[in-house]
Image (spheres, grey):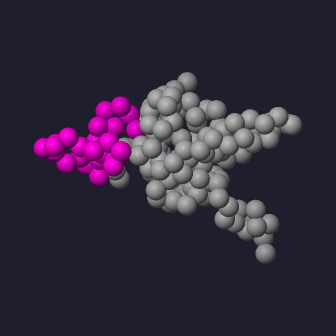
Amino acid sequence: MNVSEVLNAGGEYFKATDVPKTATGAFDLLKLTISGVEKKDFEEKGTLRPKFILAFSEDEHTLILNATNTRIVAAAYGDEVDAWIGKLIGLTAAPVNFGGKMVDGLQVRTPSAAQLTTVEPTAATPAPAGAAQAAPAAAVEFNDDIPF
């Protein structure tokens, strides 16, 4: 048995190893619909710090949002977290500097503003009567530009 089989097995939270890779070895993009948002305190260096945890319709894993990913979701969908329900995010992984070491970290992507109009309305936001059918959520392309 390999150590990584134990360390990477299951768990309720998404990890970089949960993101599939393409044939070229690059991390793929998971397209996920937010189905719930919870705030939970985590201990970091002896201090309790609140973080948001996202649940998804397509996967049983949840995602703990770090400050950067929280800002990305808030920039796309607003500061009121209840408004995030039913919205799409993309989840991928990429090398990041953590504790002076390069490790694979989770990164959130959001659709561009023009693409948000093609997402099917959710039960929370029904389509107006007589509205044309929107493209399926899977057809949404994500803007992978990093804003820095």
* Residue 138 rendering spot, x and y as whole percentages: 35, 53
Residue extending farthest to the left is 130
Residue extending farthest to the top is 148
* Residue 133 rendering spot, x and y as whole percentages: 19, 48
- Please tell me whether residue 146 is drawn above or below residue 38 in the rendered image: above
- Residue 8 appears in the picture as rendered: yes
- Residue 140 appears in the picture as rendered: no
* Residue 128 rendering spot, x and y as whole percentages: 20, 40
Quarter containing the N terminus = bottom right
Q: Main secondary structure of the magenta part?
A: loop
Q: Is residue 115 magenta?
A: yes
Task: Classify residue 127 by image quadrant.
Answer: top left
Which residue is depicted at the point 40% across and 38% down? 111
Residue extending farthest to the right is 46
Q: Is residue 42 magenta?
A: no
- Please tell me whether residue 93 is drawn above or below residue 72 in the rendered image: below
Which residue is depicted at the point 55% across and 44% down? 37
Q: Is residue 114 left or right of residue 101?
A: left
Which residue range is magenta in the image?
A: 110-136
The one nearer the camera, 93 or 118, is: 118
Q: Is residue 138 left or right of residue 10?
A: left
Quarter containing the C terminus = top right
Q: Is residue 72 left or right of residue 133?
A: right
Which residue is depicted at the point 59% across and 53% down? 62
